Amino acid sequence: MRRAVRGHGDRSQLPHRAPALHVHQRRAQGRHQGVPRLDPERRRAVHHPREGLRPRQIGHLLVSHYEQRLANDKAAIRNRIVTLGRQCAGAVERATTATLEGDRPKAYRVVLDDLPINRESRSIDKACHAFVARHLPSAAHLRFVSSVMRMNIELERVGDYAVSIARHAVQLDEPPHGHIAEEMKALGRRAKEMLDDALSAFESGDAELARETKPVAKAMQHGFDAVFEQLTTDESISRRRGAHLFAIFNKLERVADQAKNI
């Protein structure tokens, strides 16, 4: 019996070797690629969200998801800073009311309520830094977060002004009366309205409403100047009482200035 002479190019007599198991698995997976799974309850095919999409389409989906997350983070920060501003405006109003009514417990309450305001201010500052680290913002998004950080500082000062008003209020022997009380009530109300308008303008992006606060601030400045002159010339007001009243009006003026900055 002759043996077949096997040349280098003849592979017909090579022993057959079964392919590895993973090769069969790859082929099996390849046969079923693009075939949707069947949902027995709905009796229709179930597709993966990205199945059958081109790389460019998948990229658009990822960009849309990123933009949605960025918009959600911006909205959350905006809501938090506006809420903080409302709390500070309310603190100024309560401190002024406590001064006019001579209500010391209410003034003490303003001082204690400043603690959660400070905590929220620090939390917002951390949220802004996290926003920058997460999204690496530029252009309008960077201007937004930088504006919020500046507003956060100004609103924290407004809260401190409310505390100062409350502390000076408890040092008064009796509440203000006459022309001084009327001016304090009017200027305190207008300062709070300016702050509310500034916050509303920021929340809605209304530039016209923001510009309207500037002439109001100038008009209020004349009122503060008149009150300061009266406090320095009225001989019926003691030095100690005049110093406390002067400090209260000075803090209300600072509140109006911060509202103008916002």
Image (spheres, rainbow, N blue to C red):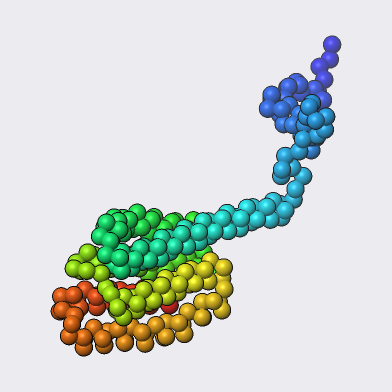
Residue 126 placement (x, y as % from top left): 40, 56
Question: What residue is at 79 percent from the left and 26 percent from the top?
Answer: 40
63 or 208: which is nearer to us? 208
46 or 254: which is nearer to us? 254
Q: Is residue 172 left or right of residue 13?
A: left
Instruction: Reply above or below: 14 against 252.
Output: above
Residue 219 placement (x, y as % from top left): 42, 85
63 or 121: which is nearer to us? 121
Q: Quadrant of residue 35?
A: top right
Residue 13 placement (x, y as % from top left): 80, 22
Q: Is residue 183 visible?
A: yes
Quadrant location, the N terminus: top right
Residue at the left extreme?
A: 239
Task: Give the total number of marks visible in the rendering.
Answer: 0
Instruction: Reply above or below: 134 against 150.
Output: above
Question: What residue is at 47 percent from the left and 85 percent from the top?
Answer: 215
Q: Is residue 10 visible?
A: no
Instruction: Reply above or below: 74 against 181.
Output: above
Residue at the front extreme?
A: 178
Q: Is residue 149 left or right of residue 56?
A: left
